[in-house]
């Protein structure tokens, strides 16, 4: 059941987020280890993604840096369904449904930001800001990208699509194509795959026009 809500690999991301919060708040690794009665080596392996931490350990570690990690599966299941509804509304360009569903999601931001489904929450937040608000900033996407290898296929597909489209919108077409082409072999969501193909078609047509213009100029 839980793997339908979040991939196990996301637990390794939480370990790295814990490290970020620990350092930001000035807690030493050895001090945390003493409080938790575990070895500094074990915490270091959790922070660097070398091992899969169990939920109890993660919850206890986050409490050490004054953060309540949300692992309420029933609550997160409901919110994950809302995020999936939002994604479908986005893929089909149902703007009113996007807006209404996103309102329900963003009201829960404090509970979702440090939770087992934070990756899907952040991707929904970023995609809404770009597709509905017209904010194509790459800052939040760049913060997520170091965790890309720990995403499941569905998360990779969403990330590549959002970043590729955002790059298109700010005129970085070649970079956008690189992200979109990465999606060609990911089929987690058929509609997202179709949108990827449509943006690639636009890009390939643009590249053809540029090439044809240059070719004609050389012949003149």
Image: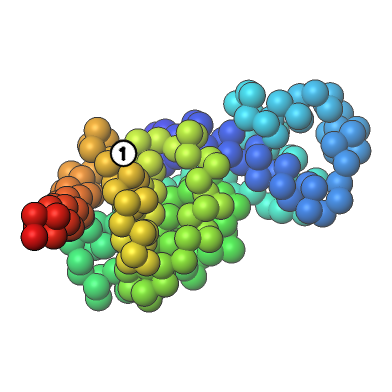
Instruction: Determine whether, in the image, residue 215 is placed left or right of residue 36.
Output: left
Taking depth in this image into account, of 27 and 175 the one nearest to the observer is 175
The picture places residue 184, in percent across and down from the top left corner, at 23, 38
Given residues 186 and 68, the one toward you in this image is 186
Q: Which quadrant of the structure image shows residue 60?
A: top right
Counting labels gives 1
Count residues near mark 1 (Cα–Cα under 10 Å), then give few for <14, some for 14-19, many for 20+.
some
Q: Nearer the viewer, residue 152 or 117?
A: 152
* Quarter occupied by the C terminus: bottom left
Residue placed most toward the observer, 58 or 133? 133
Residue at left 76%, top 30%?
43
Direction from residue 192 to residue 106 in the image, left or right: right
- Quarter of the rendering containing residue 214: bottom left
- The local secondary structure at tag 1 comes to helix
Quadrant (top left, top right, bottom left, bottom right) of the N terminus: top left
Res 29 quadrant in image: top right
Q: Is residue 142 left or right of residue 19?
A: left
Please provide percent x and percent y for residue 163.
38, 54
Residue 112 in the image, given as x and y percentages of width and height: 53, 56
> Can you see residue 104?
no
Residue 71 in view of the camera: yes
Residue at screen point 37% across, 66% down:
170
Q: Which colour assignment does the render follow?
A: rainbow
Could you tell me residue 86's position as x and y percent?
Answer: 31, 61
The residue positioned 86% from the left and 46% from the top of the image is 27
Q: Residue furthest front?
A: 220
Residue occupying the point 82% across, 54% down: 25
Q: Which residue is mark 1?
A: 182
């Amino acid at each position: 059941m839980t793997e339908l809500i979040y991939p196990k690999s996301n637990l390794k991301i939480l370990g790295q987020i814990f490290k970020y919060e620990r350092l930001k708040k000035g807690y030493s690794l050895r001090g945390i280890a003493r409080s938790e009665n575990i070895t500094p080596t074990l915490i270091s392996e959790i922070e660097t993604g070398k091992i899969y931490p169990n939920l109890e350990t993660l919850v206890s570690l986050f409490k050490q840096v004054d953060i309540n990690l949300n692992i309420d599966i029933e609550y997160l299941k409901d919110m994950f369904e809302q995020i999936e509804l939002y994604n479908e509304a986005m893929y089909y360009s149902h703007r009113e449904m996007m807006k209404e569903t996103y309102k329900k999601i963003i009201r829960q931001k404090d509970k979702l930001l440090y939770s087992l489904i934070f990756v899907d929450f952040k991707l929904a937040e970023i995609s809404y800001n770009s597709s509905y608000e017209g904010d194509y900033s790459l800052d939040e996407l760049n913060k997520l990208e170091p965790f890309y290898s720990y995403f499941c296929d569905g998360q990779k597909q969403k990330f590549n699509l959002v970043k590729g489209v955002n790059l298109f919108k700010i005129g970085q077409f070649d970079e956008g194509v690189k992200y979109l082409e990465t999606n060609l072999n990911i089929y987690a969501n058929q509609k997202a795959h179709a949108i990827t193909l449509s943006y690639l078609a636009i890009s390939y047509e643009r590249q053809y026009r540029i090439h044809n213009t240059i070719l004609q100029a050389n012949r003149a």
